[in-house]
Image: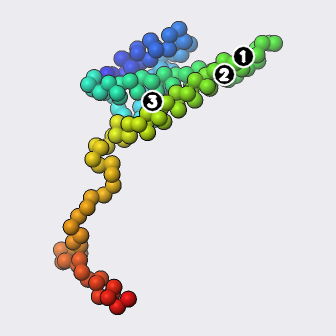
Amino acid sequence: MDAATVVDKTKTKMGSLYSKVSDDGFNQALDEALAELGWTLPISDSSTFKCQWVIKRTVRWALEILRIESAHKFKHKNESLQHRFAHYTDLIKEMDDKFVQAIEDNPSEFANVDSYKMFGGTITPGFAYSVHGEDITYDDIDAFEGS
């Protein structure tokens, strides 16, 4: 999936709201989503998980653009428009909560790390060598025997 496909799918998901965001806005939203996820395009079509999440996060960042644009419109003459701002804020919070839950449920998908590498170090036989290649495994045993 390339950038144009992500933007098109994002516009579709946003319904009629997409007309309120410019093309540059969608590109910025995509850049924000990719930076947040730590991923790059293109994403292979076989990775539907990544495709879905890059679109969801792009929608989130596009809504952020709408929220910022609506922030200055709290009062217009005698009409209060804070509800629109509050709805965008609530929607973004809900999307962020789902994103955090998805990260917790699928850490290997978001970490860009193979699952077998996620559990810390490796267990070695315990041998130690100096920078010169000399075995120094038991050099400190004398220090422990005296204590």
Q: Which residue is mark 3?
A: 33
Give the colour scheme of this rendering. rainbow
Contact flag, marks 1 and 2 (Cβ < 8 Å): yes
Dot 3 or dot 1: first in sequence order is 3
Q: Which residue is mark 1?
A: 81
Contact flag, marks 3 and 2 (Cβ < 8 Å): no
Q: Residue at x 23, y 77 (%)?
A: 137
Q: Residue at x 44, y 17 (%)?
A: 10
Q: Residue at x 26, y 83 (%)?
A: 139
> What amino acid is labelled 1 in the image?
Leu
Dot 3 or dot 2: first in sequence order is 3
Within-10-Å neighbours for mark 2: few <14, some 14–19, many 20+: some
Between residue 70 and residue 51, name the one nearer to us: 51
Query: At numbered mark 1, what does the secondary structure look like: helix, strand or loop?
Result: loop
Q: Position of residue 6 (x, y in %)?
A: 39, 20
Contact flag, marks 3 and 1 (Cβ < 8 Å): no
In the image, residue 92 above or below residue 138: above
> What amino acid is labelled 2 in the image?
Phe
Between residue 115 and residue 44, name the one nearer to us: 115
